[in-house]
Amino acid sequence: GKYNNGTTDVPDYNVKLSNGQLRYDVRLDELRLDLQLGETVEARVPPSKRWMQGIVKGRVSGNPTQHGYIIEILGRDPPQTRASAANVRRHFPVGDKVDAY
């Protein structure tokens, strides 16, 4: 990566997406791997504005970044819902092992 106009110590990256599109000057905190089936997450789904714990059950289509994920919201009836990638984040329950680098 390169450094952000020489003004910070945070590198930017040029990223090639799976569809061939390029994104320039992407910060590391803006990147994440696709969420995996069975992964514990939090999702914000209408009409609620709060984050609710759930589990990834699938992808809406081949490209979850554009079309989102199928999430099973714990304690909700009906439990399964669709959520855009922007409204789903990883969740690490208390006691889970987390590797950091």
Image (cartoon, helix red, strand yellow):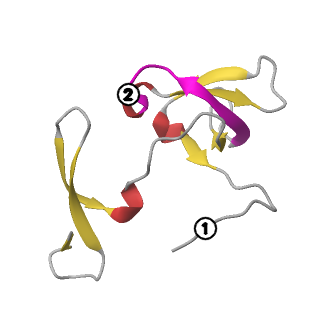
The image quadrant of residue 96 is bottom right
Instruction: Using the image, determine if residue 79 lies above or below residue 10.
Output: above
Instruction: Identify which residue is drawn at 57% across, 71% down.
Output: 100
Q: Amino acid at mark 1?
A: Asp
Instruction: Give SS at disc 1.
Output: loop
Instruction: Give SS at disc 2.
Output: loop
In the picture of the structure, the residue carrying the numbered disc 1 is 99
Instruction: Identify which residue is drawn at 51% across, 74% down.
Output: 101
Instruction: Identify which residue is drawn at 29% across, 83% down.
Output: 9
Residue 18 located within the stretch drawn in magenta: no
Range shown magenta? 52-64
In the picture of the structure, the residue carrying the numbered disc 2 is 63
Residue 86 screen position, x and y as percent: 47, 40
Outermost residue to the top:
78
Find residue 69 and name its label. none
Label 2 – label 1 distance at C-alpha: 27 Å
- For the N terminus, the quadrant is bottom left
Q: Amino acid at mark 2?
A: Asn
Decide if residue 76 is on the left or right side of residue 11.
right
Instruction: Identify which residue is drawn at 72% across, 40% down.
Output: 52
Instruction: Tell me which numbered mark, 2 or 1, is placed earlier along the sequence.
Output: 2
Decide if residue 32 is on the left or right side of residue 97.
left
The overriding secondary structure of the stretch rendered in magenta is: strand
Residue 39 screen position, x and y as percent: 64, 41
